Amino acid sequence: MLLIIVLAAVGIYLLVYLSVQAQLQAVRSGAIPTQPGAEQAMSQTLRELRPDRVQGFGVQIVSGLGSVMLIVFGASHVGTEFGWGTFRTLLAHGAGRGALLVAKVLSLALYAALFVFLGVVAAILGSSVATAMAGADASGLDLETIANAAARAYYTLLPYMALATVIAVWSRSAGAGIAAGLVVYFTEGLVAQLLVSFNRDYANVVNYGLSRNVGAVIRGGAGTTTLPDPSAVALPDQGQAVLLLGIYTVVFLVLAFWRLRTRDVTVGG
Amino acid sequence: MTVQSHEVVLRTAGLVKRFGPITAVDGLDLEVRRGEVVGLLGPNGAGKSTTIGMVLGLITPTAGSAEVLGRDVRIRREDALAGVGAMLEVTSFYPYLSGRDNLTAIALLRGGGALTRVDPLLTRLGLAQRGGSKFRTYSLGMRQRLGIASTLLPNPALVILDEPANGLDPAGQREIRELIRELASENRGVLLASHLLYEVEQVCDRVLVIKKGKLIASGTLAEVTRGGSSYFEIVVDDRTRAMEILRSLGVKEIRETPTGLDVVAEPARGAEFNRALASRGLYASAIIPRASSLEDVFMELTEAETPSASPAS
C-alpha cells in the first residue's frame, strides 16, 4: 500500500507535467485556439511542479491521497478483526478491549506518519523528475517548510482515520467502514464547496465540517499553492481548524472506545 | 506425580443474560474444580455459548456473577483470564499467518513462559509438520487442533472447550478425548461444551444439562443417567403377539425396533417376561436389560417441557 502512494505521487507529477506541457506547446505553436490568460495559467501550473513548491502542490496530493488511504486502511485494520473473528479470539485469550483499540489506533497513527513521509519524498522525487524534464531551475527546495507542511498534512489525516475506525467498530465490518468513510469524505467536501459557491454565508455552517477545516490547515502552512482555488473561499481560521479537527478525532475515538467496551461479543465480534 | 487439589476454578452464581425479551441464560449456578471434566450439555440455543461468553467476559451478564480462580470476571477480567485457556466454537485465527505465528502472537499477548510452549504444543497436537503453513490452508480438523493448542499456551488452571471435536475424524476425536483426560490428570479443570454425547460420556466426571438457559440436571454421569428409565431389549420374531402378551402384564411403554421390542420396565421383571412369552409359545432370542445412556436421558430431559421451578439438583 505504501508503494502505491510513492507511485501515485510521482505519477501525478509526471501526468500533470506532461499534459500541461503538451497543451502549452500546442497553444504556442497555434495548433489549438487559446483563451486570454490561459498560457499564463498553464505556465503557473508548471511553476507549481518545481521543487520549491512541493510544500504546496506536493503536500496537497499527499493529504488528498492520504485521507482516502487512511479511511481504507483504518477501516480494514479494525474491521477485518471482526470479519475474521480474531477480535473474539484475542479477547478470549485475555486481551483488554481498550488495549486492543489503543494498539490499533497507535499502529494506524504510525502508518499515517510513514505514509506522509514517503509521500512527501515521492513528491520531491516527482517534482525533481518533472523539473529535469522541463529543463527548468530545480533549486529552492526548502526542507524545513516542507516538513512543516507535511506535519499539517499528517494532522489532517487523523480525523479521517478516527472516522473510519469508529464506523468499522460500530458496524463490525471493514467494508462498511470504507464505504461510509469515503462517502463522508467525498460528499461532505463536495456539498461544502457547492454551498459556499452558491452563497458565502453558508461558510458559517459548513466551516464546522471536516473538509473545510482540513483545507484551512493545509493551506495555512507556509508556502501554499498560488493556483486559483474556489474551495479556498472563506475558509475557517487556523486556530478553529486545528481545534475542530482535534475535537473530531477525539470524539470519534471516544465513541469507538465506548462502543467496543460496552458491546457483547458474540460470534465474530 | 501431580498432587491433585480440588480447588474451585470456575464458579457462576445466578448467572442471567437477557437479549431484549429473550432470556438466554436464566440463573445458572455451576462449579468446576481442578482435576475434573465437566460437560455442559444442551440442545442448540440452550445457552451454552452464551454462558461461556459470560465466563470469558465477552458478554456482560444481566445479573449474577462468574468467578475464575476466585476473581470476578466483571471486575478483574484480565487477572481472571490469565489462568484460563479457552477455545470458542468457531476457531478464528489470522488467515495470513502460519499456525506457529498465530500461536506466537497469542503467546506474546499472554506473556510469561507462553512463548516457550509454542513448539511443544504444536507437536503435542500433531501440527509440528504444518506449523509453518498459513492458517487459511488448514483443514477444519487442523484448525480445531490449533485452537486447542492455543488454550494450553498459558498453562491454564481452567480449560474451556466449546465443541472441540468439530470437524475431527474418529481418530482425531479419540485423541481429543485422551487429551481432555490428560488435562484433568494434570490437575486442570475442564469445562467441555459438546453435542457429542458419546464424547461427553467418555470423558466427563460430571455433566450439566441446560435447556432454555436453565439448569435442568446436574451430577455425575451415574447420577444423571439414574434419573432415566431402564428397559429391556427383547429380540423376538412376532412383535405384534409379543406386544399383546407384554401389555397383558401391565407394561405401558413398548417401542418396536427392527429386531424386536424395547420394553420400559424395572430390571427385576426380565424372568417374568421370559416366562410369559415362552408359556404362549413365543421364544425370545434375547432379553437384555439396558440402562438409559446419557443420550437417552438427554433426549428425555430436553424434549420434555422445561420445569418452571428452580434448576434441578
Image (cartoon, rainbow, N blue to C red):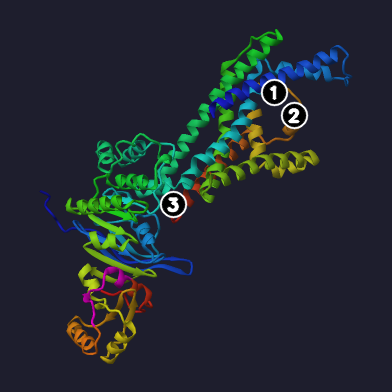
Q: Is residue A103 left or right of residue A141?
A: left
- Kindly indicate the quadrant of the structure image that contains residue A31: top right
Quarter holding the C terminus of chain B is bottom left
Whether residue A229 is situated above or below residue B34 in the rendered picture:
above
Disc 3: host chain: A
Mark 1 or mark 3: whose residue is earlier in sequence? 1
Disc 1: host chain: A
Real-space CA distance between mark 2 and mark 3, rounded to the nearest whole angstrom: 44 Å
Q: Are marks 1 and 2 on the same chain?
A: yes
Real-space CA distance between mark 1 and mark 2, rounded to the nearest whole angstrom: 9 Å
Q: Position of residue B271 (x, y in %)?
A: 17, 84
Number of other residues with Cα within 10 Å of mark 3, as a class: few under 14, some 14 to 19, many 20 or more: some
Disc sitting over residue A229 in the figure:
2
Disc sitting over residue A261 in the figure:
3
Which residue is pictured at 54% across the width and 50% down the height?
A: A171
Disc sitting over residue B56 in the figure:
none
Q: Amino acid at mark 1?
A: Thr
Whether residue B198 is situated above or below residue B296 in the rendered picture:
above
- Dot 1 corresponds to which residue? A225
State the SS at label 2.
loop
Segment colored magenta: B283-298
Q: Amino acid at mark 2?
A: Asp
